[in-house]
Image (cartoon, rainbow, N blue to C red):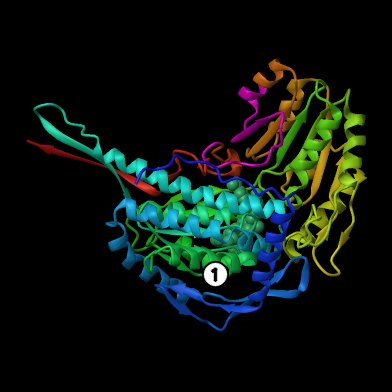
Amino acid sequence: MAMYEFRMEPFTDLKQKENIKQYHEGLKVVESYLGEEYPLIINGERVKTGNVYESKNPADHGEVIGYMHQAGEKEAELAMASALDAFETWKKTPAKVRADVLFKAAAILRKRKFEFSALMTKEAGKPYNEADADTAEAIDFLEYYGRQMLELEEVDKKVLSRRNIERNEFKYIPMGVGAVITPWNFPLAIMSGMTTSALVTGNTVLLKPAITTQVIAYKFMEVLEEAGLPKGVVNFIPGDGPEIGEFMVKHPKTAFVSFTGSKAVGQTIYEEAAKIRKGQKWLKRVIAEMGGKDAVIVDESYDPKEAAEILKGSAFGFSGQKCSAASRGIIHESIYDEVLKELQKVTNDLVVGDPSNENTAVGPVTDEKAFNKIAKYIGIGKEEGKLLVGGETDNSKGWFIKPTVFYDVDPQARLMQEEIFGPVLAITKFKTFDEALDIANNTEYGLTGAVLSKNRAHLEEARESFHVGNLYFNRKCTGAIVGYQPFGGFNMSGTDSKAGGPDYLKLFMLGKTVTEQL
Ligand code: NDP
C-alpha cells in the first residue's frame, strides 16, 4: 500500500450548523457515560484499588465526569514488571507493526472526533474550537510519528561498508521502559503524543496522566487497545503526582522520563532522574517540556487594532492555560495608549462561561488550585500595575476568571517574571527595539514569543536575538502544528525536545553501530 505524505488534520468549521449539531451529538455521547468508574490498566488487566478520585467538570463542580481508581506504589511496581516483560517482545516487533497501531488509532479518533472533543469540553473545560484543535493535533501526532518511525527504520538499510575491510551497520534500538508523565492542558494531544512517541520507537510505557483529566486518558487507552496494541506495552497508572510520578522517576528500571508540566516539577524530575540508584545500569534520559512566560512585542509600525486582536488571541485562548500563551505584552510607547484602548474593548467582548455552550469563548480554569493561584496573582497585579480590564472571579458553580489585563507593569515585577497559567496579561512599554528584546529575554523561560512589526530590520534582529524555542512573526504566539512547527522551549522551558518535529523520536532510542571484520 502506498504511504500518503503527512497532512495536517483540518480543523472543523464551527460556523457550520451541521458541525455544531455533531458537536452536540458528541456531548450527548459523553453525557451517557458521565459518572462511570474507571480502573487502572496493568498488563491489559483492569485493576481497582478502591482509592477513588472524582474527576469533576471545571465549569460545574456538581458534575462528576468519572470515578477514577488511583494507583499506589504497589500497582506502580506491578506496572513496571508488566512493562519490563512486554519490552522483551515489543522491542522485536517490526516498526511497521508498531506504526500501524498509531495509524489505526488515528482512524478511530477521527471517527470519534466529536466525542473526544466534547469530552475535553466536559473534563478540561475546553471551548469547542480549542477542543477540536486538541483532537486534530492528537491525530496529527499519531499520523506523523507513525511515518517518522518508518523513515527512521530506513536507516538500517544504508550499508556503511568500508570497501574490502569491514561491514558497518548503524541502526536505532529502543531504550526500555519509559515513565510518561503528562499535563492536563492538552489532555488528548500532548498525552497521546508523549505516549505514542515512546511506544512506536519500541519502548514500553508507564503512563501517569494529570490528575484532572484522567477520563480522557482512559478513553485513549481504549483506543490503543482497539487499534491492536498488545497488553503491557502501555500500563495506565493514574495517581497522585508527587507519589506515583516520583516513584516512576526514581525507579532503577526506568530508562527514560518523558515529562510535560510546570518548571518546578520538571526541575525536581531532572534532579531525581540524575541520581543513580541501586540496581540501575544506565543514565536515565529526561525529555522535559516545561512552563513559559511568553511575550508579544508590538513595534510602532503595527496597526494597533490588529495588535489588540492578536494579543487577545495569544493571551486568552483556553483561558491562558497554554504553555505558549502570551502573558506579557511589550508595546512601543507611540502606540501604547491606542493598543490598550482596543485591547480593553476586545477583551471585554469575550464571552466567559460554560464551554458546553458553543458561544463561549473563554471557559473555566482547571481546578480550585489553579483558580486560587490565578486569583492570588490578580491581587499581586493590582499592586504591581494598573487594571485595564477584568479582575473578577466567580467560583460559585465553576472555576471562572474574567480575562484580565494589567498595564504599566515593571519588567522586573512578579507579574512579568512568574508563570501564572491563567487569563492574565501584563503590559509594559518600550522606547527602542533593543530595549523591547531585552525585556522579552529577561525571564528564566524561553518557550514562545511573537513580534508584530512591518519593519524588516526589527524582524531580522528578533530572528537572531529573541531567545525562544518557537518564535512567531506577525501572528499569535500560540498554536504549534505537528510536522510544520516543531515545538519546544529553551532555558527553564525545557530540554528543547521539539515535539512534532523530525528529530523527536530519536530521543527515545539508542543508536547502535555494528562492525564486522571480513
Ligand atoms: P504539573 O507540573 O503540576 O504536572 C504535570 C504532571 O506531573 C502531572 O501528571 C502531575 O501529576 C505530575 N507531577 C506532579 N508532581 C510530580 C512529582 N513530584 N514528580 C513527578 N510527577 C509529578 O503541571 P500541570 O499539569 O499543571 O501543567 C501545566 C504546566 O505544564 C504549565 O507550567 C505549562 O507551561 C506546562 N506545559 C508545557 C508545555 C511545553 O510544551 N513546554 C506544554 C503544556 C504544558 P498530578 O496532576 O497528579 O499532580
Residue most extreme to the bottom: 50
Q: Kindly report the secondary structure that dominates the magenta region of the rendered protein.
A: loop
Q: Position of residue 300 (x, y in %)?
A: 82, 21
Query: Is residue 466 magenta-colored?
Result: yes
Q: In what quadrant does ligand 1 lie? A: bottom right
Report the span colored magenta: 461-484
Q: Quadrant of the rendered structure where residue 78 is?
A: bottom left
Relative placement, left or right, of 278 versus 117 is left
Q: Residue type at mark 1?
A: Pro
Per the image, the residue denoted by label 1 is 238
227 over 509 or under it: above or below: below
Query: In what quadrant of the picture does the C terminus appear?
Result: top left
Q: Quadrant of the rendered structure where residue 191 is?
A: bottom right
The front one of 86 and 474 is 474
107 over 504 or under it: above or below: below
What residue appears at the point 73 percent right and 36 percent down from the top-left corner?
295
- Is the residue marked 1 within 8 Å of ligand 1, measured from its CB? yes
Secondary structure of the residue carrying numbered label 1: loop
Q: Position of residue 246 (x, y in %)?
A: 52, 63
What residue appears at the point 64 percent right and 50 percent down from the top-left corner?
133
Residue 504 seen: yes
Q: Position of residue 33 (x, y in %)?
A: 63, 75
The mark tally for this picture is 1
* Label 1 CA crowd tier, 10 Å (few <14, some 14–19, many 20+): many
The front one of 102 and 363 is 102
121 over 474 or under it: above or below: below
Q: Position of residue 239 (x, y in %)?
A: 56, 70
